[in-house]
Amino acid sequence: MENTSAPLAFLSGIRIVDFTQFEAGPSCTEALGWLGAEVVKIENPKLGDPGRRRRPNAPDEDPWYFYIFNAGKKSLTVNLKSPRGLELVKDLLRKADVCVENFAPGTIERLGLSYEDVKAINPKIIYCQVKGFGEGSPYESNLAFDMIAQAVGGTISVTGEKGRQPVKPGISLGDTGTGMLMAVTILGALYKRRETGEGHRLQVAMQDAMLHYMRTNLSSQRRTGKVVERAGGKVSGITNAPSGLYPCKGGGPNDWVYIMTSRANPEHWSRLMTLMGHEELINDPRYATPADRVKHEADVDAIITDWTLRLSKHEAMTKVGGVGVPAGAVLDTMELQNDESFVKRGIMQTVEHPKMGSYKMPTWPVRVDGKPPTLVRAPELGEHTEAVLVGWLGMAQGDVEKLRAEGAL
Amino acid sequence: MENTSAPLAFLSGIRIVDFTQFEAGPSCTEALGWLGAEVVKIENPKLGDPGRRRRPNAPDEDPWYFYIFNAGKKSLTVNLKSPRGLELVKDLLRKADVCVENFAPGTIERLGLSYEDVKAINPKIIYCQVKGFGEGSPYESNLAFDMIAQAVGGTISVTGEKGRQPVKPGISLGDTGTGMLMAVTILGALYKRRETGEGHRLQVAMQDAMLHYMRTNLSSQRRTGKVVERAGGKVSGITNAPSGLYPCKGGGPNDWVYIMTSRANPEHWSRLMTLMGHEELINDPRYATPADRVKHEADVDAIITDWTLRLSKHEAMTKVGGVGVPAGAVLDTMELQNDESFVKRGIMQTVEHPKMGSYKMPTWPVRVDGKPPTLVRAPELGEHTEAVLVGWLGMAQGDVEKLRAEGAL
């Protein structure tokens, strides 16, 4: 879809050595890739990023996860445990602007690629680390994955139905949410480096990153003095009604619509009641102010539900949105994947893969001068080994073959 | 805490005219502020950003939300509907590198500050818009707030207990999650602009931004061919056990621990069983492989629960983490707010406010050369009107007083 996307070259010329795996690190370097940086993923020659597969020690059987978090990158395989392989990576790091890693605590240091090691060979490098827990935390040597970050970062505690067990937010915020904060900081460092030439060490912990997304909850707690409780479809601490998820015709698991009246706009209530044929309730003293409606929230919700149950979620969204009140149908993953609007606007793009055929995925969702960046597919394992060694290090074809024979690649 | 933070000047010299309100926009410009940009918030003289209060048309009663999303900014009050006020803002825009707005659709254009208007007076500006729905979407003129974005962006559909109603993830990802993607893109544009001097128009829709955080779910769906269902404390599509939330001693609403064995590390199971005194189960054929354990997941979960129920969530986390298996206690908002580790590491900082006394809040969680940036408090309404008009536009004190008398400020 040439007319709905355009290649983005904001970071053209920026070289990134990417040691990341799974999602928190890869989502970060991928963001820089969307902006035009050259991202070279360093992968082990046997199996590569464990995010490439679902089964340990087995070849790719489910590469979709990998494709989605590694769009536009190059793959270079190298044996980091061979002295020659390590030397090669150091040569790449000498030419790099940024390197990023999210290995288990201590791993990159054991490989001989600590911040001090890399700074010694390239003082201008921006050296970035993503870990589960922060340096100085009692848990700093612990492993973490997305769900662990969401437990210790609080997002699980505030998610779930009222009075019932906590649930994990269904998105991998512990990973991608952390990756975005590191990407922001790397870009700040790169901006300054154009002026100063200075390198820096950047570190983020997934637990700490979750606090950034918990700030609305922390502000609610400050007001009430109480732990923020789970509120189901509602928002804990919001003092306005109606606001919440309402069931629609069909009765399927996602036949729900979110309707929200804003405390900043008192007209939302009267517009809703007019739409729903209840003009007589607009000035009813039980519902006159947001505080009144909160007091009678169960009644208010029953009035709304009586109306939404007669409509599909799309009809309800269209009608409520049409009178200027915020509304959104709960869309499921299949509805999102098949939504034509995303394709027309370049937010979802399709790409050909030599082995897997074509696939469609979300691209970087910010438009630049009207268009999101053009999707470039994720690399096959080792696809760019030779191209990068020739391009970055000026090697000859024969050198690369020799290294391969030596077991360094 | 001077030794746990340091001012960050990556973006020193960058001037941002900030028309944003509530959270999606403010979280974006605040991130640029953490990096050292000068962010001038344009607020209406009467009440300012509606995020400053919980009651419509009333003065501040609950500024914590505002403080958290506007740290380090300056506040300039101006009446955008007075011709002189508008002219002043245009003068500021002439001096600005970036402007950001997240008004309701059509508002900025009606004010006479559309992209074309601003580009005409400052072709180098990076002009940024955050809306609920994307240009070209059937809903592009609809209002949206965080929860609407999370409905139409799919995050609600995948959150909740298995077989029960959807719930809203307890974090305001529709807002802050969108703000972070815009911040990344602005920084890319700023980086390039140092070379080219070119301005750009950037646009993001909250619905589209949610897709970025839904990508793990979309990859799971691609594998199974089915809509991703809600999975409570578990992760839909993960084919490994044990993994999930387990109840702990105490029985309180957040007395739970997340324990997760990785498919990439087969030793997690044997380490867990050794820790729990069940060496006999390590090679039990019912539990020998991840696939076997998934088949007997209810039994596996019962074995784990029998052990976790005897310990506090902190003890369970420490013991499981101690044998190299990922584990995290479900921390609630009060535990996070009072956690000494965040203070020691500069991730939470305390600041004095002239009216509200001292308050403690999370800072930008990425450390630069070992330290997060130093917290600077959010501004009072109009606190920097004079300083900015003098500093940016070279006005004299008397000019400012005259403008105030005219009702432009």
Image (cartoon, coloured by chain):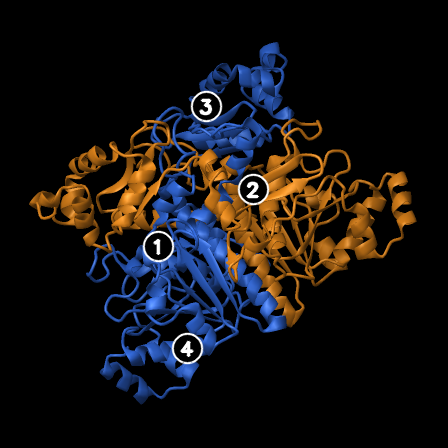
Chain colours: A orange, B blue
List the residue tagged with mark 1.
Answer: B141
The reply to whether the C-beta atoms of the residues labelled 3 and 1 are less than 8 Å apart is: no
Q: Please, what is the three-letter code of the amino acid marked with disc 1?
A: Ser
Marks 3 and 1, how far apart at CA: 51 Å
| Whether marks 2 and 3 lie on the same chain | no
Marks 2 and 3, how far apart at CA: 40 Å
| Whether marks 3 and 1 lie on the same chain | yes
Marks 4 and 3, how far apart at CA: 59 Å
Which mark is nearer the camera, 4 or 1? 1
User: Left of A39 or right of it: where is A339?
Assistant: left
Q: Please, what is the three-letter code of the amino acid marked with disc 4?
A: Leu
The vertical placement of B166 against B138, above or below, is above
Q: Please, what secondary structure does the residue beneath circle 2 have? A: strand
| Whether marks 4 and 3 lie on the same chain | yes
| Whether marks 4 and 1 lie on the same chain | yes
Q: Please, what is the three-letter code of the amino acid marked with disc 2?
A: Met
Which mark is nearer the camera, 4 or 2? 2
Residue B308 is marked as 3
Residue A128 is marked as none
Marks 2 and 1, how far apart at CA: 25 Å
Regarding residue B41, the answer to whether it shows in the image is yes
Is tag 4's residue or tag 1's residue first in the polypeptide sequence?
A: 4
Residue A361 is marked as 2
Q: Please, what secondary structure does the residue beneath circle 1 have? A: loop
Q: Please, what is the three-letter code of the amino acid marked with disc 3?
A: Thr
Which mark is nearer the camera, 2 or 1? 1
User: Left of A362 or right of it: where is B117?
Assistant: left
